[in-house]
């Protein structure tokens, strides 16, 4: 193969500063862009690969790197500049001209590792002063090396579609195949273009060489390069297809089959390209070998799970199909038992993945030992297993098999230094009674398993047609919830918190409500889990932040001084990557002080991936935003982790408040919790306070604030206005800040 390609010619432009300090055409480094960012040769290769991805997008992309901010940009960005000649080494401030002062802070932010967006910039002014009314967002994303150090900036321009001219299609059409291209063939990395159905539309010479094929003779479908056992795992391409609605670029290691029959480990940077309608068009793979040992080819790898040695998901179709044929010949029924381990993720995260794997091996062994010789157990993936029970004469036969499984699995296991109690949920479907094809059998078993989970631990449920009706109702509910977001049916209510020291309102909690066209106002507790399930929670979280922000700014414009508003954060948001960035962007764009905001975290959401949660909360608190732990006492309370969390408030759940006046045990628990929180430097908020007796008890025990119907129900913004006027806060603004 030849050396690195020359990027000095279209379709991609390359500029490098000459180093002549006396060159007046070269802008001096902007002082705000220090420190120096050195670029190693390996990093330059990465930049070239990133630019390669940018080449296939009509979205204007510019890459800045090095202390002198050497610029690389794609053809779309050059067109944005009206194809004007760019001086060697032209810096971003000179390149953007009069727009530089408006984007300088965003560039600084990215240089410090924080992505930034500058909305609605008149980039059309760069075209020789021509104004076509199109506004664009300027996005600046840091590019980091293996040491997590920023060494480059990925800058792109995304048109908002505002103005008189229609927005351009920023993405390639789905039929835009890559033809033989010397530029791509000369890259040291392997390149593949993959369709949605996994057809290989293009591969460069480096890809063929890496896999041992002559140029142009690589297999026609990606499945032919992957182990059979990997095709149906969460890491496979089909799963990526399911993610195309939420991400555009990611990286993953894959085993790929070499022409000689071995498997090699490849590192892949994947860019997902959408068509004009926002649907998946194709994926671009930038692949390289990792240097790890090759794995000999064996039929065993395609049919059996390497961890448990059980048949895997790929083998399941064959085994179930054979069992159905046996049932047809014998005239007997076939039972499909689908089960998973309850709270396996908790074990995995709290004890470590090695012990989690050991638990899976133990469960697999117990399943095999509890079954008849004619039965088969399959590991479908993660903690999910299937049992194929043949020669079923009557339903009681299945009940006996299930009882044996539950009894065997429920016995305590020893993992490391821990004794673990196992519970499972099990769903069953019957052939041919319930269904006559494999997919429907598995679907019905899954529906029954979901019903078993609702019933409690170590339960089994047999599929019935009524369950399918419930599932259909669930699908309708999902559809209604999705439409609710599009129809702007969500709204925010606010419930004040009363300070027991001053008797004034010291804060409030923002509560999401659904203004249902038939049911009226619906609380979040009745639909938030469904929103998480269908992937709507991110949009709802963004809506809540935006709504609270608008309300705070409205109060400020009215001359009122808001107290902090607590915003609930779901488990998916807390464990996801965008919460911190969203809050940073909100503060930067609105100019609101961070003291106006609180983030409220439910205690039960803290136990999973505690280290990551702790770091996220620490970073948020450093912004000046306070942290509240909600529903304390209802989750997995531990002094160890509670003392290490960067929290400002501890909210005692209403369950403990309801009976504190008459129940000594509850009173003792609440008093102890208050003492504990104060010793850890936290203030205490009691939820669900409804009586004067409860208030008096809490005041005498040193509780800091209360929240509940005794003070106020959750109110709409207009209702809150009336409430504040009624309690005499009208002349001092909404909130008295302590």
Image (cartoon, helix red, strand yellow):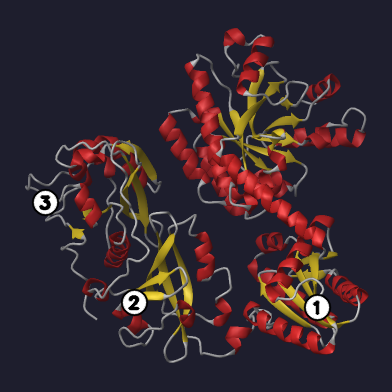
Residue 535 shows in this picture:
yes
> What residue is pinned by disc 2?
203
Tell which circle, 1 or 2, labels the residue nearer the N-terminal end.
2
Report the residue at 21% width, 42% height from top: 96
Q: Nearer the viewer, residue 381 or 633?
A: 381
Question: Is 390 drawn above or below residue 68 in the view shown?
Answer: below
Q: Residues within 10 Å of mark 3 (few under 14, many from 20)?
A: few
Report the residue at 24% width, 57% height from top: 74
Q: How many circles with numbers are drawn on the protein?
A: 3
> What residue is pinned by disc 3?
85
Quarter residue 63 falls in: bottom left
Tell which circle, 1 or 3, labels the residue nearer the N-terminal end.
3
Task: Name the image quarter holding the C terminus.
Answer: top right
The circle drawn on residue 366 is 1
Q: Residues within 10 Å of mark 1 (few under 14, many from 20)?
A: some
| Cα distance between the residues tagged 2 and 3 | 33 Å
In the image, residue 188 lies at what x, y percent?
29, 75
| Dot 3: element | loop
Q: Viewer-nearest of labels 1 and 3?
A: 3
Q: Nearer the viewer, residue 550 or 107?
A: 550
Q: Residues within 10 Å of mark 2 (few under 14, many from 20)?
A: many
Residue 606 shows in this picture:
no
Report the residue at 20% width, 62% height from top: 11
| Dot 2: element | strand
On screen, residue 369 versus residue 138, left or right, reads right
């Amino acid at each position: 193969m030849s050396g690195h390609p020359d990027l000095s010619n279209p379709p991609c432009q390359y500029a490098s500063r000459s180093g002549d300090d006396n060159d007046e055409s070269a802008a001096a480094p902007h002082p705000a862009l220090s420190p120096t960012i050195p670029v190693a040769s390996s990093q330059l290769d990465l930049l070239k690969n990133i630019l390669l991805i940018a080449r296939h997008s009509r979205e204007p992309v510019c890459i800045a790197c090095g202390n002198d901010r050497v610029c690389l940009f794609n053809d779309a960005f050059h067109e944005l500049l009206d194809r004007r000649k760019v001086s060697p080494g032209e810096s971003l401030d000179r390149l953007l001209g009069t727009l530089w002062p408006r984007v300088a802070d965003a560039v600084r932010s990215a240089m410090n590792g924080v992505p930034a967006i500058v909305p609605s910039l008149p980039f059309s002014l760069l075209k020789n002063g021509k104004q076509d009314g199109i506004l664009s967002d300027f996005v600046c994303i840091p590019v980091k090396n293996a040491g997590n150090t920023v060494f480059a900036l990925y800058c792109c321009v995304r048109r908002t579609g505002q103005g008189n001219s229609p927005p351009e299609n920023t993405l390639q059409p789905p039929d835009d195949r890559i033809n033989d291209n010397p530029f791509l063939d000369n890259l040291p990395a392997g390149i593949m273009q993959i369709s949605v159905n996994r057809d290989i539309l293009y591969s460069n010479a480096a890809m063929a060489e890496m896999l041992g094929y002559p140029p142009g003779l690589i297999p026609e479908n990606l499945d032919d390069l992957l182990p059979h056992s990997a095709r149906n795992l969460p890491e496979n391409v089909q799963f990526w297809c399911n993610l195309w609605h939420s991400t555009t670029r990611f990286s993953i290691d894959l085993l790929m089959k070499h022409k000689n029959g071995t498997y090699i480990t490849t590192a892949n940077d994947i860019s997902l390209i959408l068509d004009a309608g926002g649907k998946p068009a194709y994926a671009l793979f930038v692949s390289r070998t990792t240097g790890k040992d090759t794995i000999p080819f064996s039929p065993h790898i395609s049919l059996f799970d390497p961890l448990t040695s059980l048949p895997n998901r790929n083998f399941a179709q064959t085994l179930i199909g054979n069992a159905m044929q046996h049932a047809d010949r014998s005239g007997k029924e076939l039972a499909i038992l689908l089960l998973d381990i309850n709270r396996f993720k908790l074990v995995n995260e709290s004890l470590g993945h090695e012990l989690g794997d050991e638990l899976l091996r133990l469960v697999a062994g117990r399943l095999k030992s509890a079954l008849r010789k004619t039965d088969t157990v399959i590991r479908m993936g993660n903690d999910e297993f299937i049992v194929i029970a043949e020669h079923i004469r009557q339903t009681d036969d299945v009940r006996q098999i299930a009882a044996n499984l539950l009894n065997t699995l429920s016995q305590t296991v020893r993992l490391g230094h821990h004794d673990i109690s196992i519970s499972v949920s099990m769903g069953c479907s019957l052939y041919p009674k319930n269904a006559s094809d494999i997919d429907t059998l598995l679907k019905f078993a899954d529906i029954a398993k979901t019903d078993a989970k609702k019933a409690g631990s170590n339960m089994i449920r047999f599929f019935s047609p009524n369950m399918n009706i419930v599932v259909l109702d669930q699908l309708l509910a999902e559809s209604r919830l999705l439409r609710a977001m599009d129809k702007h049916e969500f709204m925010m209510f606010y419930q004040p918190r009363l300070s027991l020291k001053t008797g004034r309102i010291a804060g409030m909690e923002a509560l999401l409500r659904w203004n249902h066209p038939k049911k009226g106002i619906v609380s979040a507790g009745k639909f938030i889990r469904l929103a998480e399930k269908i992937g709507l929670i991110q949009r709802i979280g963004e809506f809540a932040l935006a709504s609270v922000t608008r309300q705070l700014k409205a109060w400020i414009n009215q001359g009122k001084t808001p107290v902090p508003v607590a915003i609930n954060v779901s488990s998916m948001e807390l464990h996801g990557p965008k919460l911190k960035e969203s809050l940073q962007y909100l503060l930067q764009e609105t100019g609101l002080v961070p003291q106006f905001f609180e983030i409220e975290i439910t205690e039960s959401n803290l136990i999973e991936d505690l280290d990551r949660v702790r770091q996220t909360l620490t970073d948020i608190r450093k912004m000046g935003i306070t942290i509240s732990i909600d529903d304390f006492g209802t989750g997995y309370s531990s002094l160890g982790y509670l003392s290490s969390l960067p929290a400002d408030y501890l909210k005692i759940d209403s369950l403990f408040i309801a009976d504190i006046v008459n129940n000594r045990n509850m009173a003792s628990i609440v008093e102890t919790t208050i003492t504990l929180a104060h010793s850890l430097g936290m203030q205490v908020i009691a939820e669900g306070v409804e009586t004067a007796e409860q208030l008096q008890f809490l005041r005498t025990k040193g509780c800091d604030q209360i929240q509940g119907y005794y003070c106020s129900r959750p109110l709409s913004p207009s209702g809150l206005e009336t409430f504040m006027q009624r309690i005499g806060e009208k002349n001092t603004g909404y909130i008295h800040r302590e």
